[in-house]
Image (spheres, grey):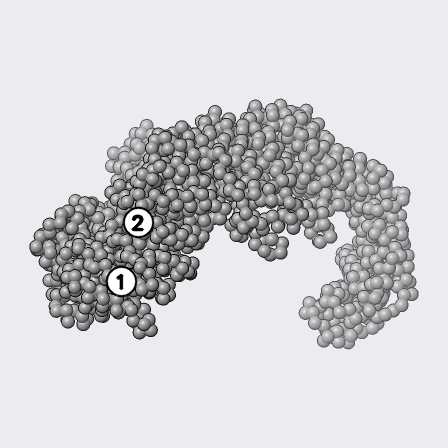
Amino acid sequence: MEGSSSSSSLTSKSDGEVEEMLDRMLTRLALCDDPKLEALVSKLLPLTISSLSSKSPAVRNKVLEILSHVNKRVKHHHEIGLPLLELWKLYTDPAASPMVRNFAIVYVEMAFERAPAKEREDIAPKTLENVSKFPQQHQEIILRIAIKVIGECHARQISDDVAVKYSTLIASQDKEIFLDFCLHMLLYQPPPQGGGTPPGLSVFQVNRITGKQELKGDMLTKRKLGILNVIGAMDLPGESVYPLYIAASVDSQEPVAKRGEELLKKKASVTNLDDPKLIKRLFLLFNGTTATEHAAPEHSVAPGNIALKMKLMSGFCRSIAAANSFPATLQCIFGCMYGSGTTLRLKQMGMEFTVWVFKHGKIDQLKLMGPVILNAILKMLDGFTGSEADALSRETKTFSFQAIGLIAQRLPQLFREKTEMAVRLFNALKLETQSLRSTIQEAIVSLAAAYKDSPENILKDLEVLLLENSLAEQSEARFCALRWATSLYNSQHCPSLYICMLSAADPKLDIRELALEGLFLKEEGRSIVSNHDHKYPKFTEMLEYILKQQPKLLDSSEMRSQKLLFPSQVYVVMIKFLVKCFELQMEENNTQAVGTEFLYSAQRMCLLLEHALAFEGSAELHACASKALVSVGSYLPEMVEVYCSQKVVWLRRLLSHTDLSTRESASRLLGMASCALSDTESCSLLSELIASVSQPPQKLRFEAHHGGLCAVGYVSAHCLYRIPAVSEAVIQKSVKCLVDVVNVETAPLASVAMEALGHIGICGPLPLLVNDSSPGTQVLEVLQEKLSKLLSGDDIKSVQKIALSLGHICSKEISSSHLKIALDLLFSLSRSKAEEILFAAGEAFSFLWGGVPVTADMILKTNYTSLSTDSNFLMREVKSLSKELSDAKTGDEDSRVTTRETISGKLFDTLLYSSRKDERCAGTVWMLSLIMYCGQHPSIQLMLPKIQEAFSHLLGDQNELTQELASQGMSIVYELGDSSMKQSLVDALVNTLTGTSKRKRAIKLDEETEVFQEGTIGESPSGGKISTYKELCNLANEMGQPDLIYKFMDLANHQASLNSKRGAAFGFSKIAKQAGDALRPHLRLLIPRLIRYQYDPDKNVQDAMAHIWKALIQDPKKAVDEHLNHIFDDLLVQCGSRLWRSREASCLALADIIQGRKFDQVGEHLKRLWIAAFRAMDDIKETVRNAGDKLCRSVTSLTIRICDITLTEISDARQAMGIVLPFLLSEGIMSKVSSVRKASIAVVMKLAKGAGVALRPHLSDLVCCMLESLSSLEDQGLNYVELHAANIGIETEKLENLRISISKGSPMWETLDLCINIVDTESLEQLIPRLSQLVRGGVGLNTRVGVASFISLLVQKVGTEIKPFTGMLLRLLFPVAKEEKSSAAKRAFSSACGVVLKYSSPSQAQSLIEETAALHSGDRSSQIACASLFKSFSSTASDIMSGHQSAIVPVIFLSRFEDDKQISSLFEEVWKDITSGERVTLQLFLQEIVNHVCESITSSSWGSKKKAGKAISKLTEVLGDSLSPQHNKLLQCLISELPGRLWEGKDALLDALGALSVSCHEAITKEDPKTPTVILNLICSACKKKVKKYRESAFSCLEKVIIAFGDPEFFIAVFPMLYEMCNTASVKTNTQVQSGSDAVKTESENGEDGQVPLEKIIECVKSCIQVATVDDIVSRKADLIHVLLISLSPGFLWNVKMSGISCVGKLCSRFQSLWNDSMDDGLLPSDATKFAHELFHSLVPKLLECINTVKIAQVHVAASQCMLELVEVYSKVSSLHPVEVDFKGEINSLIELEKSEEAKSLLRKSRDALANLS
């Protein structure tokens, strides 16, 4: 370092020497001028300051004197710079003393102000290094300097190199100091007029950042923007810069705020807001320094402004650390609520933060701060007046209530001792606006948990509050009251249950549902008490509380009958709940002995139910109440009988009720009432009832008639059932009445009468009907015909009742004839399609069979309906029913034998094996009913094997009901049978599921047998239906294929098989639960099929098999793993099944089962999985294709995972890759199915991404396949468009580029990119030969370009490892690049050649370059190839190409001048690439270029000659006379080639000769003085040729040659020829037809006669005048004037006139120089003066004419200038030859008409000059 070296040199000197040296410095400074002061100071100042290390006072004084002098000199001269870098090095010198550093830092600060921007920009980052180690005062100075530079240099942007320098601030302390200073600068705002500290800063911090300079305005904005740009470029963690960006985003200056917001989103979006250090800094910005911190006044930080606080709050609400930073959290919340200057928005955000704190705060801290915050919230809520209208107030309230709810969850102990908060929130719920109620509602619900364990007195107070609010007008209040009632109290709490009852009729659905949950303990309801015995309160307590709340329920019957005290729905719920409580308490007692208190409550319950039956109630309420009374009677019959016996009149009124259930219940109650009446009273009641129903039908309402018939049945049954029974005559009277009704009335009433007969029959055999004609007739004999008609009717309910009544009537019947009639009537229902009728008939058969678990008491004294209803239509759980069956009485067996034989015979011989599906269904229902209701009967036990066979047969029935019931029957048979039967049943079911079951019992088909369900196989050709056997036969005959019937039957067989499996599944799922170990041997066969069937297209089959699976398999994962191979084998075989449903199910099952599998589980099946997937994707059926797509996605996911070396072992990945990749490349990508191709490509690409090195063995196959796919998988439309591109105006090359661009964006190319990254030496040996084959034989543009590009990328990737293959590749690529027709492909192969060339041997490189250079002389394709190759070489192998420049440069230079624009432009690009400077390159390789040009000129190709001519022209243009050393060779070639025949392009040689003459005229003349004459003669000869273009070039060349050589003799030699040519041109022009138009003259002048434009000749004349002597000019003056007059004549265009005017000007200039020379001699030649006189008078008129006639300003200016020159020339001789003609008048008129100011000025000068002559 310079500072250290200077200090070390000073230490070696004594103080005296140092003082002397300093004195000399001072002298030099004093004598130094200001311009030289900077250079002197830059040397002396560091040395002077370093001298302060001396302890000598004299030295220090001398230093101070020098520094004082420097200060005075530079103070006001800011342009004088100081040595910044040297001063900084001096300051940072470790050996520097404190005094040296103190002075150095002062001058460093001064130097920064004067330094150039670039230097300041570079040094500023260095000043921040180790800034933490500097003294505090120095730190401030350095930081202010850095920030100032940042503001001045980086306010707009920061360059990358400077950003890197700032990023090197690695030391954490340096970085923190810098960031803190930046933060303070960003927080700084100019203080207001009254003063004060800016928000977020302390006085000390303000002084630190400002120093002595006031910061404001644009300067402050720039510094802040600069800071943001620098910090943004430093790429610091978000935790470090988040405060800075926050502070900037709320700045008062828009640019700063905008930039801060941008960086906040871009750089700090992922900031960890839970960093404790960051949160502490943010809270300091928000709260400032608190009083508890006891900071000094100048260090006390002021709180942030409102904008900053709001910005910070948004971050606090996302930080858990902020929620737990007490006490700063508490200060923040109180600052938002009550801080000075707080706003509504800040209050709202404060409450939002409070919610966040209560949600995420630690419980220990919440316990301390929670009460304080809660009181603040309540205080703030009290401060709001009424319902606030503005949104911020509403939001603040919202967050306040949320906070209360959350703190209630976290700190419930704050609330449970008092009810004030509950009262407050419930009141708020009723007073606040609708928008706030949902939030308050949530808070109230949360608060409920807080009161959970409150003291008893608090809970009592809450009961009152809840009851009050449950009746409130606001639905939210009602909901919350109910929610509290259901959650706060247990399920035995009567007041809360009462609230639930009251809420059951609420208008709001959610309240009603919650009330029901609270009463009946649904899943979503209470879950407090799990013991079933204690879920409901005591019946007596619940009833007592209800009656206490509403005593009027016990008013007199008159009061009760008037109106209801509650809504009907409340009564319904109340009654249901009370009945449930009653039933549970009765079950708990489990004894007939009931206490007096309970009986009293039961009696009061009856009064409540009577009240509920008031007229005002709904039908539902009446039905519920009447059923409840029957339920009470079923447990307490004596009490209810007595009670009802007192209410007979009231009950009889209910018989005509509009509700059916109410009438039936009233009838039951009336029957029960008759038991408490005396025999006389009972008979009297029965007689009255019989009389009421015996009236003519038209006098009775249906309801009254129905109720009366029901009552007759129940009362008669009770009379018959009582002991002792009433007289038989009374019963006969009832039976006769009912029989008459059956015979007379319609089905509804007849069925009711039959039901009444059944109720009588259940108590005993019906008495005979006695009349006058016969001693006694059985009831069914009388009714048989009528019943037959009724059973064949359409009224299903009536038929159902009649069928049940037949069973009841015959349950105690012993007459065989009576039983036979009943059986015949029931068997007539076998073809019914109504399921309800079949179930009713099955129940009737059970009563006929005997052993049914039903008693007369159950039917007469309970709410019993039927066994079908109780057993859920035969689908009830078997175990629960078996208990009932075991307890049932078997009845009288002797009287039933015949009946049972008849029933079983009908079932087994006719119905179960019928060809009609409806009969099979009926037989199944009846058979199942028998074993369900009578299964324990010995006769049923004996028939179990036969029953099992029948049910097994019915599992495959088409009817779903038959299937389900057969499977249900199987499970019952399994339960009822012994061990051998259970085993045989399991075997049969397994065989059915696996398809190996034995042949079933054959069913004979008749013509009406339904083979298919209607619509299954469509319609016949004539539009008829096809379902029966007869219709199928007709269809086969109509189609002329009778054998088609067998295919139909085969299809039906398959359908039956599928149905069997589904039916077996239903039975199996139930048996599997009990079969246990018996099924284990069959799992190997069952599991694969069960898995497949769970994916069957038929939803019913899926559900059935899912039932089996759940029942059979305890651990599905383990079972699947154990049998995985068998599952795979079965599913893969079924993927090729001829049945589409099997194929679809197998695909779906495989798709699920392979997920998550490892290679060792699926490896052996992997290829078959892909084959199955691809086959399914091409299936004929759409659903199978969809399943195949799903399977393909699953197999893809599996394959990618097991081939990914990051997820699978490398060995397994290699094996998997070896299986999958060859298959995909050969079968997948080459498939004709588009979906398969796309899927294969996608998989291959994903494999390439994850397989890594596992891909190497297959690399060659993969690469070649992908390259071929680039073309084979291209959209064929592009090929078509390219073929017809020319016809539709599209450029082929652009289209090719488009195709290539599309292909390079394809997945195939992406895969190729991935392949390149894993190539190694071993894979290269396999890959290069395959690529060579593809280069030779590949077809398609994309493939050929792709292979070339791939080779390029490959070589670049492997580098020198390609060297063994370079020779082969170059031999391969070069011919292709040469012969390729497509320009895009040619470029690609050329590029590949260039890349390979880079790594080739010198001999290979030389050979290739020579062959490439030779291409330039070939055809067009070869030339393009040559250019493309050289361009590629220059860009990729420039170092190799530089060694062969001598061979390359001449070829490229010459080829630049090809006529073909495309070729020349290509070589032009190459030329620019290989040359740094054109002139230098040409000079360097001039010899080689000239030789090459000469060869081209002498070649037999005209194109080469022309090209060489252009090249010579270019050489002369660039090199000028530097070409002289080689001019002779070029000149001789040109001279030898110019004579002879003309050919197209020969004019280029003339141009070259002219250019060569111009640039090398001196050398040519010097070498041989005669050569110019030879050249002139050659050119003159060329001027006489007849080809127009050639002659034009000759004249241009002639002009150049004349001027170049400047030989005066040339005038004599050339002018005569030019004169003749002018005359010839003039004559031809005059002989043509004059049209007065310049355009027409142009056409005539440019005729196709070889005529050269006259302006060319005039230019040559001009050049002759330029080189001729004056004497020679004067000697041909007449001819010259003639030529000039011709050029100015009207017959020629303006450009000819311009040439003539220019020629006159040149002549004038020659005369001017002559006059000047003559004036020196004192004499003027007389001939010259005469010539001047003639020239003036001859040409001035012509010039005036030109100005007058030609309308071009350029001509006017030139002619005016020429005329002025003529006047000036003539003025020299005017004294000898006075003016003969005065032109002033014409000139004046022209001046008036002239528009050009320049021409006008010249004309005035001419006029004035003429005036002076006169």
At horizontal 11% and vertical 58% (from top left) the residue drawn is 601
**Front position in the image: 436 or 267:** 436
Instruction: Tell me if I can see residue 856 in this picture.
Output: yes
Q: How crowded is the residue under tag 1: few (<14 C-alpha within 10 Å), some, or many (20+)? A: many
Looking at the picture, how far across and down is residue 1123, in whole percent?
Answer: 43, 29
| Picture residue at 23% right of the left edge, 66% below the top | 687
Between residues 1564 and 969, which one lies in front from this camera angle? 969
Q: Indicate the amino acid at tag 1.
A: Ser
**Type of amino acid under label 2:** Ile
Name the mark on residue 814: 2
Where residue 1174 appears, x then y in whole percent? 56, 38
Residue 1709, horizontal then vertical, whole percent: 77, 58
Q: In terms of image quadrants, where is residue 1809?
A: bottom right
* Mark 2 in CB contact with mark 1 (< 8 angstroms): no
Numbered circle sitting on residue 1013: none
Foreground label between 2 and 1: 2
In the displayed structure image, the side of residue 262 where residue 275 appears, left or right: left
Compared to residue 1019, the image places residue 1532 above or below, namely above
- Please identify the quarter of the rendering in which residue 310 is found: bottom left
Mark 2 is surrounded, within 10 Å at the Cα level, by few (under 14), some (14 to 19) or many (20 or more) other residues, namely some
283 up-or-down from 1152: above or below? below
Residue 451 lies, in percent from the top left, at: 15, 53
Q: Quadrant of the C terminus?
A: bottom right
Which residue is drawn at the image coordinates 31% and 33% (left, top)? 94
According to the picture, the residue beneath numbered tag 1 turns out to be: 734
- For the point 17% across and 54% down, which residue is it? 723
User: Mark 2 falls on what kind of element?
Assistant: loop
Q: Earlier in the sequence, mark 2 or mark 1?
A: 1
> Which quadrant: the N terminus?
top left
Q: What is the quadrant of residue 751 in the picture?
A: bottom left
Q: CA distance from mark 2 to mark 1?
A: 21 Å
